[in-house]
Every structure is written in structure tokens, then in C-alpha cells.
Image (cartoon, rainbow, N blue to C red):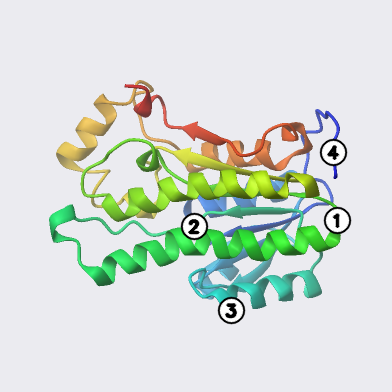
Amino acid sequence: MISKPYSTDFTLEGKTAVITGAASGIGYATAKLFAEKGARVCLLDRNLDAARQAGNDIPGSHAYFVDVSDYSGVNETVDRITREVAPIDVLVHCAGIGDIEWAKDFDEKTWNKVINVNLSGSFYMAQAVGKKMIEAGNGGKIICMASQAGIVAIDKHVAYSASKAAIISIVKSLAYEWGQYGIQVNAISPTATETPIIVGYWDVGEVHKKAIEGTPAGRFCKPEEIAAAAFFLATEASNMITGSNLVVDGGYTIH
């Protein structure tokens, strides 16, 4: 069993971090912050051109295509990174989609798409990276994006909520199984965050008004605030935290 000691080392110097959904939003903010804190970052996205463009602002970064719902493709990409860049120390899995509809109107195709990308994709990435970490024997950090929608009921989010609640459960299972290898696995549950995924629903009209009224912090979250939470969970200072769900919601789920 690998047991990591107590540490207050708030740095990622010399670490290799893989971030999915890295072309924009939380993924991009995380990649940028991690690079500033010394990490060698790999930006993964299904839009490779956008990932490369995002990487232009992050010196020394590497961009890779990945469709997280493609099991074989995920494993091939992780293999490439370990060959071409370095063994992976940190995974932050941000890739996800947010198709919404009333439960009675949700069709099979959309349900399967959301579950395949959000839920299966989270497991595929965590498993592929986790296996590499176990083989390397140096431990590691795996962080998956869940959501406040995985904790409380939100209308029109049935598939999204199901996928995010399941991610919280997967994180617990992986943390339990992989603790012996020195791998910490955690989730982060953001509130509505100012990224492209909320445009046209959370950021306009009555939905926006009610969401802000129901949030004690009085505003939505910035991508950089979620990146900061991921940074803490990626450092050695969080060695005693595993199987947890760090809720960054401005108090939305406390009532």
C-alpha cells in the first residue's frame, strides 16, 4: 500500500496533468492555472483545433483529440500521452454536455448521448488514466466534474442529473479501490458557471432570476473558481481527501 504523508505543498511543479474539455470553460481555466503552477498540461477536447488554439496561451502545453464516449479512443489517447509526453500525475475530467428537456419529453437518443458522454466518458477517462497510474506505482490525482444537479432536483435536467449523481458514486468506488495505490479520486460539484454550456438557459430570463435568488452567494460561479478547487485537489496538500465531492455552489444546495 502507498501511503502519502501530510504535506502543505501547494504546487504542481514537475507534474503532468491531463484536462478534458480543455478548449473552453472550466477545462481551459484549469489548464491555464495548472500551467501557471508548474504543471506540464495536456489539453484534450473533441474539437482539436480549438484545443490547439487554447494551447497557444499556455506555453509548453500539448493538445490531443478525444471523444470521451469512445472507449478505445480514450485508451489510445492516454497511451499516446504517456509515450509522447510523460506519465500522467493528474487527471481533471471536465468534458460534458448539458442537453435539457422535461422528463416526459426526453427521447431515447438524447438520453443515451448525455449518459454516454457525461457518465461513461467519466469512467472511461478515469479508468484509462487510473490503470497507467497503478502501473507506474507513483500514485496520482483524479478529479471528475459532477454538479449541483447531482445533489438536488433541477427541472429539465433528468439525464444530466442522473449522470452527475452517478459520477459522485463512481468517484467513491474508485477512491475505495485505488487508495492502496496512492491514488486520490474526488469530484467537484459546481453551481451554474459562466461557460458556454449555460448560454440560453441559465443566463437569461426567469430561470436566471430564480437561480440567483436561490444562491446565497448572489451570483453564478466563475470558471477560475472551479479551477482553483481542482488545483487544491491536484496538489499534495489534499493527500488526505479522497472519495469526496467538493461542492462549489455559492450555497445553492443548502436549502
From the top left corner, tell me how far across and down residue 97 is, in percent.
38, 59
Of mark 1 and mark 4, the one earlier in the sequence is 4
SS for dot 1 = loop
Give how far apart the Cα atoms at labels 3 and 1 are.
23 Å
Q: CA distance from mark 1 to mark 2?
A: 32 Å
Q: Which residue is mark 4?
A: 3
Left or right relative to 67: residue 115: left
Q: Which residue is mark 1?
A: 137
Is residue 120 shown above or below 186?
below
Could you tell me which secondary element the residue under label 3 belongs to? helix
Residue at the disc numbered 3: 72
> How many other residues sit within 10 Å of disc 1, few (<14), some (14-19) or many (≥20)?
few
Mark nearest the camera among 2 and 4 is 4
Nearest to the observer: residue 254 or residue 44: 254
Q: CA distance from mark 1 to mark 4?
A: 12 Å
Residue 6 visible in the displayed image: yes
Give the Cα separation between the discs numbered 2 and 4: 35 Å
Q: Residue at x 55, y 60 (%)?
A: 123
> Mark 1: which amino acid?
Gly
State how far apart marks 3 and 2 are (Cα): 24 Å
